[in-house]
Amino acid sequence: MKLRNRNLDPERIADFECYRSGILELIVGNAPLTNVLTEIVLGIETLNPTMLCTVVLIENSKIKIGAAPSLPKIYNDSIEGVTIGPEAGSCGTAAYTGKRVVVEDIGTSPLWKNYKDIALSVGLSSCWSEPIRSHTNEVIGTFAIYHHEVASPTEFDIFIITETADLVSIAIEKSIVSEKLTESERRFRDFFEKNSSVMLIIEPNSGDIINANQTAVQFYGYPHEVLTKMKIEEINILPPEEVKAERLRALAEERSYFAFSHKLASGAIKQVEVYSTPIETSNRHLLFSIVHDVTERKIAEEKVKSLLSEKEMILREVHHRIKNNMTILYNLLDLQAGSQENEAIRNSLKDATSRIKTMSLLYDKLYLGKAFHELHLDEYLVPLSGEIVSIFPYPVKLITEIESLQLSAEQLQAIGIITNELLTNSLKYARDSSKELEIKIKVWAEEENFFLLISDNGKGFDPEISNPDKLGFGLTLVSMLTKQLNGLLTFQGASGAEYKIKFPIHKTHP
């Protein structure tokens, strides 16, 4: 606070500066607010013995006596709790208006009409009151000077009342800050000491453990007085330079989460997760760390990983054997087909080998490659179609327009067999020697349904035939698989064969 430049008596100004310095020492020394306010009042009264002073605090728009050691108790009691307002004496009015109120004669002032009797009865004749403002400009109280005689303030009196009001403001605000800080420290201390989590306070540069709560003492197995004389490097098994580097990252708020191995007093190693944040206390920066023991979880995770790895290995072995069995079955049927003189039997066996080949390819994609929930239809159907076409010894133009749709293993298997049957049917029967055989496979999604279209530019078939059962086992199988998908099969053969299958994206149960 800087004294205002006035043409006042230098000696009296010097006395006030000396008085003010003493008050500021009390404030800085965290003396109780009541003591500071009392010393402020008594100090002004010492500078001018004709004055009787008081500090009034305002709480919920009501007057509360902060310090008035020289005023009669009966008078203080009479104004305690009075609501501030435009006619509430000098202090009540000053607090209400936020302006200085100078009443030279209490007996004649309309501001004192409700309180003059008690004031005059104890010999109070004049009252000057100055609002006390916070740093946010809120009126938090008043400083008042009374006289036993009717009196007008001099220039020095105005100086005294304004400067003292500023001094009281400093004292009140410092007390509020100190109380909040004390309460905050108390809450933090309770939170820290009584918390069930392991908590440490660490000096980031040296690594000294400044404090540890009771849970930390129990976890690490060191007495509190021992643990708080240790460095964190004695617990963290990483090299000291790495531990310090991680502390400084936490201090700079580059990271707040760390995974470490900590060594207990017993020698046991615990896997821990540490959450560290910087805090400031007593004008120095520290790290507040919460430590979670995750040893059991890490052991469980490793066990799960091991079991999953073992399961994966077993599944791969099972699928490998199934694939081998499919290959053996395929080779046996293919060998049997080659030895048959009866063309009908030979063709039936070839059809069977083709279906096995279709399921074998699906196995390759589902179980020997990526997980089936990541397998898309185009990744399965394009190579399958290519393999089927490659079996036949004449040129075929294969056109595929297959969207990258994600289907279930059940849907993939059914669509694979359907494609095999229809594609093989076109390759066998649709070829016209006058032109190159062209086969188109298209798959797309529309609203809530998938569509599969397989068509060729071949000979076609009798359009009068509408029952798939009349077209042989292959189309009977296609019809059955379509029903399995809750789908609908339509076809026509007037100008080449065309088969269209519609089935829901999400399987529905009838």
Image (cartoon, helix red, strand yellow):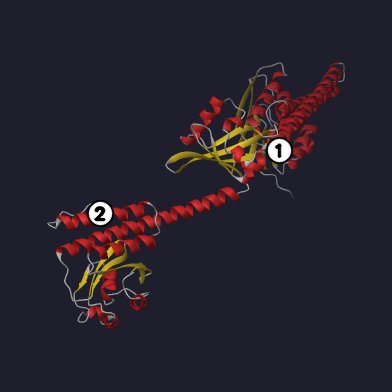
Q: Amino acid at mark 1?
A: Glu
Question: Helix, strand or loop at disc 1?
Answer: helix
Residue 174 x, y percent position in the rendering: 37, 55
Q: Amino acid at mark 2?
A: Cys
Residue 398 x, y percent position in the rendering: 63, 23
Q: Is residue 453 left or right of residue 307?
A: left
- Is residue 409 placed above or below 434 in the rendered structure? below
Q: Is residue 430 left or right of residue 25?
A: right
- Is residue 261 placed above or below 177 in the rendered structure? above
- Camera-side residue: 212 or 394? 212
Which mark, by number, is residue 18? 2
Q: Residues within 10 Å of mark 2 (few under 14, many from 20)?
A: few
Question: Helix, strand or loop at disc 2?
Answer: helix
Residue 35 x, y percent position in the rendering: 37, 61
Q: Is residue 158 visible?
A: yes
Q: Nearer the viewer, mark 1 or mark 2?
A: 2
Query: Which residue position is annotated with label 1?
Result: 296
- Is residue 127 placed above or below 360 in the rendered structure? below
Figure quadrant of residue 199 = top right
- Camera-side residue: 358 or 458? 358
Which mark, by number, is residue 504? none
The alpha-carbon separation of the residues under discs 1 and 2 comes to: 67 Å
- Is residue 228 placed above or below 460 in the rendered structure? below
Q: Is residue 462 visible?
A: no
